[in-house]
Image (cartoon, rainbow, N blue to C red):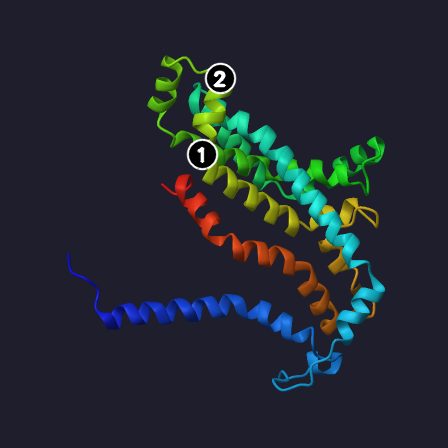
């Protein structure tokens, strides 16, 4: 098999870096705009040289409770992820190891629910949440995020479980292991990369969810996505302050994603891409 030339490899590397910089540019622009004055932020052509200021971050902190919104995002993301995994794991186990004639149709139906526009069920969901007293509560957003992400988690876990050799499970049963021991000592350790990547993906999706956060919360359970939207005023968008608020909102999940990117890619490619 012919090996690619050094020139070809360098060309691929440079192209990859250019594409990465192009994708990353909006985040870089937002980060820099957070340190500009409002006049510099809307200047055309953009001001490449400017005197950085902390004014926007100070005003963001004074106008809104960033720490409370961040705490709400953490509670909602972790709570929804735990609940979704608790439901998705048994379902994926049944689909993977005890399939029926309707398994494939059921999985496709679950995936098809992701194609339903959220706005199409906004009114009934809002009325149900209002009658149950779930509006502007952590439990309400945990439930709605769980329902949103459940089809994806079931599909991913189904792929991970299906890739576990069934012979290993059978060998354990022949040796007399119980169902709980099979899960604890065989299945979960083998599928742990996939379970971990599912958890990370769910946390990221919950953290970035905005539609339901804006429509089902006002203040008490408002996460960081609602925190960002609060900087949109009838007078217009204040780009510098909005950029500072957005930078504060995405910073935690950006750090988590950066630190766990290797595990996330390994887990997703372990079962989903095959």
Q: What's the mark number on residue 179?
A: 2
Label 2 residue SS: helix
Q: Image check: 188 left or right of 205?
A: left
Mark 2 residue crowding within 10 angstroms, few (<14) / some (14–19) / many (20+): few
Q: Quadrant of residue 90?
A: top right
Does residue 130 lie above or below 253 as drawn? above
Q: Nearer the viewer, residue 173 or 218?
A: 173
- Identified at 72% across, 73% down, the residue is 240
Label 1 residue SS: helix
Q: Quadrant of residue 11?
A: bottom left
Quarter of the C terminus within the rendering: top left
Q: Position of residue 99 (x, y in %)?
A: 43, 21
First of labels 2, 1 by sequence position: 2
Quarter of the N terminus within the rendering: bottom left
Q: What's the mark number on residue 191?
A: 1
Mark 1 residue crowding within 10 angstroms, few (<14) / some (14–19) / many (20+): many
Q: Quadrant of residue 31?
A: bottom right
Q: Position of residue 273 (x, y in %)?
A: 39, 43
- Identified at 79% across, 60% down, the residue is 230
Q: Position of residue 186 (x, y in %)?
A: 43, 26
- Number of numbered callouts drawn: 2
Residue 259 appears in view: yes
What's the distance in space between the residues labelled 2 and 1, CA to CA?
A: 16 Å
Residue 233 appears in view: no
């Amino acid at each position: 098999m012919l090996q690619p030339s050094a020139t070809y490899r360098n060309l691929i590397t440079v192209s990859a870096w250019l594409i990465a910089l192009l994708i990353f540019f909006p985040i870089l622009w937002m980060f820099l705009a957070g340190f500009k004055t409002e006049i510099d932020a809307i200047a055309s052509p953009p001001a490449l040289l400017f005197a950085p200021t902390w004014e926007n971050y100070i005003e963001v902190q004074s106008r809104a409770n960033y720490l409370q919104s961040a705490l709400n995002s953490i509670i909602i993301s972790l709570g929804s992820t735990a609940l979704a995994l608790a439901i998705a794991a048994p379902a994926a186990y049944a689909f993977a190891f005890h399939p029926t004639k309707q398994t494939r149709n059921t999985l496709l139906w679950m995936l098809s629910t992701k194609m339903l526009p959220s706005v199409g069920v906004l009114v009934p969901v809002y009325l149900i949440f209002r009658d149950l007293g779930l509006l502007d509560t952590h439990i309400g957003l945990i439930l709605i995020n769980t329902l949103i992400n459940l089809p994806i988690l079931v599909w991913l876990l189904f792929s991970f479980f299906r890739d576990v050799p069934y012979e290993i499970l059978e060998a354990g049963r022949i040796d007399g292991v119980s169902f709980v021991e099979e899960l604890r000592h065989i299945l979960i350790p083998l599928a742990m990369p996939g379970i971990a990547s599912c958890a990370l993906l769910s946390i990221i999706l919950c953290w970035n969810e905005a539609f339901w956060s804006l429509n089902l919360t006002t203040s008490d359970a408002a996460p960081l996505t609602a925190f960002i939207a609060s900087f949109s005023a009838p007078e217009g968008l204040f780009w510098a302050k909005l950029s500072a608020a957005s930078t504060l909102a995405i910073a935690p999940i950006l750090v988590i994603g950066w630190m766990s990117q290797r595990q996330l890619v390994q887990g997703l490619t372990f079962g989903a891409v095959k």
